[in-house]
Image (cartoon, helix red, strand yellow):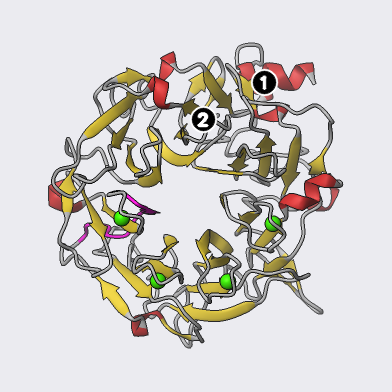
């Protein structure tokens, strides 16, 4: 354990002992000893320079490049037992059929919060069924779509073949409830090769009828990996069946070419009227200054605001949370290439929620990355980690370096007491560091009350973590709340 902690601290491990991109796998995948749940009775919380490997509970993928935890969803109860759960995407997972194996068919797997009462075993899953389908390329908990009182979920499969179109992608609605498997209730399919359906997904009840609307992005990138205009498809709450995404109840597009509309989305009640809105980013709009839209019940693209500087990619990630406890959610925007502190040190900006939100967004605070190329804002999440009723803000910085550990990644925790304009992330007293070179932690994380004690628990996805010498197996680590 001491050696592992040294790897996290980053100054005692010579570079030749760290894996590199070009090295071949040193052992076959079948020998990977997976991390499978809670290994300790000690409930570890996040402090200063906490190592991700100190987590009380950890899970991992099963093969090299499974990218287990590359994305995850939490903060809602989707199996109906009263405890929050975690849906983990592992889009590179190898899936074994009766006669053949499908590489990168992918998987989404549910961790029921209640399983932590036992050994923390993973539960129901949904497996891909074709090579490079990337099931679990995105995951979202979307609230109660069908009105049975249980939250529902969306699973993206970016590489799904649709008709003759490779890589058209699909978004799969799985209704919540108890069960041994995750079963598709409706599959919404993309219509463009390389359209990459389900790039981003969220759910929110924007008309206040008690049923969640779902928002699904596609058309973000072309075959050259260049950004396109992007589209956001909205299905109103209720029962749904299989359909092309193009047949959604409403299709939003900003009309700005190569703007990346829908790169990220976040749902929250920004004006505090008790009904949710949805924020949608266009990080490349307005000549690379970026534009963030917020839509309400009428789904009109009538409100937006611009970024602060060109090429900062504002809205690469978005989040919503009530940091100050006034009943309205703040809108939080990550601009990982912002240069305020240093080149691409990155910045996270917090816009105050409240009755005047739609008059003009007011900056309630901003955090700057510590150093050159740290890319603060490459991941965002919110949740109440200390149980005081107000949300904490979690900010990822995927490109940190610490001693010889380059690109290990770091997650900073900030509370309302830390809010100010131009605060350096270096001054924050709670953070979690990636374990080793190119773990890139900070892109994937969330907060859910998994153990039911009333405080949120921090769930960290480390999709690029190595295990047993195998590369990018990926892992998910749990730190209990109650700081
Ligand atoms: Ca549950
Ligand atoms: Ca439901
Ligand atoms: Ca609704
Ligand atoms: Ca509202």
Residue 102 is left or right of residue 187, and the answer is: right
On-image quarter of the C terminus: top right
Tell me the number on the disc at residue 43.
none
Residue 85 placed where, x, y %?
A: 66, 53
Instruction: Report the residue at 35% width, 22% height from top.
Output: 372
Tell me the number on the disc at residue 411.
2
Instruction: Report the residue at 54% width, 73% height from top.
Output: 172
Q: Quadrant of residue 313?
A: top left
Residue 164 is left or right of residue 96, and the answer is: left
Instruction: Give the crowd class for mark 2: few <14, some 14-19, many >=20 residues within 10 Å.
Output: many
Residue 428 is left or right of residue 270, and the answer is: right
Residue 424 placed where, x, y %?
A: 35, 18
Question: Which one is in front, 269 or 45?
Answer: 269
Q: Is mark 2 within 8 Å of ligand 1?
A: no
Instruction: Report the residue at 52% width, 59% height from top.
Output: 140
Magenta residues (range)? 258-270
Residue 306 placed where, x, y %?
A: 16, 45
Magenta part, dominant SS: loop
Query: Along the polypeptide, which appears first: circle 1 or circle 2?
Result: 1
Residue wearing tag 1: 7
**Is 54 included in the stretch rendered in magenta?**
no
Instruction: Report the residue at 46% width, 79% height from top.
Output: 189
Q: Quadrant of residue 66?
A: bottom right
On-image quarter of the N terminus: top right
Q: Quadrant of ligand 2?
A: bottom right
Q: Is mark 1 within 8 Å of ligand 1?
A: no
Question: Which one is in front, 318 or 116?
Answer: 116
Tag 1 and tag 2, C-beta contact below 8 Å: no
Query: Of helix, strand and loop, which one carries label 1?
Result: helix
Q: Going by the picture, which residue comes out furthest to the top?
A: 12
Question: Which one is in front, 211 or 104?
Answer: 211
């Amino acid at each position: 354990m001491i050696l592992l902690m040294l790897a996290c601290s980053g100054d005692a491990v010579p570079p030749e002992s760290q894996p590199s991109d070009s090295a071949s796998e040193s052992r076959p995948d079948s020998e990977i000893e997976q991390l499978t749940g809670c290994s300790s009775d000690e409930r570890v919380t996040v402090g200063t320079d906490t190592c991700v490997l100190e987590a009380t509970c950890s899970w991992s993928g099963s093969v090299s490049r499974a990218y287990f935890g590359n994305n995850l969803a939490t903060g809602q109860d989707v199996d109906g037992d009263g405890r929050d759960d975690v849906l983990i995407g592992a889009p590179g997972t190898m899936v074994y059929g009766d006669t053949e194996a499908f590489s990168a068919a992918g998987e989404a797997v549910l961790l029921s919060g209640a399983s932590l009462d036992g050994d923390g075993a993973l539960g129901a899953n949904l497996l891909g069924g074709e090579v490079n389908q990337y099931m679990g390329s995105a995951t979202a908990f979307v609230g109660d779509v069908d009105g049975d009182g249980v939250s529902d979920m969306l699973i993206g499969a970016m590489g799904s073949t649709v008709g003759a179109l490779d890589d058209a992608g699909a978004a799969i609605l799985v209704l919540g409830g108890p069960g041994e498997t995750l079963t598709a209730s409706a599959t919404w399919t993309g219509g463009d090769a390389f359209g990459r359906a389900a790039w981003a997904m969220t759910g929110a009840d924007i008309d206040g009828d008690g049923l969640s609307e779902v928002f699904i992005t596609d058309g973000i990138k072309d075959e050259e990996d260049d950004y396109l205009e992007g589209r956001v498809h909205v299905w109103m709450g209720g029962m749904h069946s299989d359909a092309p995404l193009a047949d959604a109840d409403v299709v939003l597009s900003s009309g700005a070419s190569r703007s990346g509309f829908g790169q990220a989305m976040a749902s929250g009640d920004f004006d505090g009227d008790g009904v949710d809105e949805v924020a949608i980013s266009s990080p490349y709009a307005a000549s690379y200054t970026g534009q963030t839209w917020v839509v309400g019940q009428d789904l009109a693209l009538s409100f937006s605001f611009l970024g602060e500087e060109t090429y900062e990619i504002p809205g690469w990630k978005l989040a919503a949370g009530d940091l100050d406890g006034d009943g309205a959610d703040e809108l939080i925007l990550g601009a990982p290439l912002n240069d305020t502190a240093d080149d691409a040190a990155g910045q996270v900006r917090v816009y105050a929620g409240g009755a005047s939100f739609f008059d003009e967004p007011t900056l309630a605070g901003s955090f700057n990355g510590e150093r050159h190329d740290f890319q603060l804002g490459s991941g965002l999440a919110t949740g109440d980690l200390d149980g005081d009723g107000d949300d904490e803000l979690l900010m990822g910085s995927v490109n940190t370096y610490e001693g010889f550990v380059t690109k290990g990644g770091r997650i900073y925790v900030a509370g309302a007491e830390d809010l100010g304009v131009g605060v350096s992330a270096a001054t924050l007293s709670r953070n979690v560091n990636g374990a080793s070179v190119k773990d890139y932690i900070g892109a994937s994380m969330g907060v859910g009350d998994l153990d039911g004690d009333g405080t949120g628990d921090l769930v960290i996805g480390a999709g690029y973590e190595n295990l047993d010498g195998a590369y990018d197996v990926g892992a998910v680590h749990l730190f209990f709340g109650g700081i």
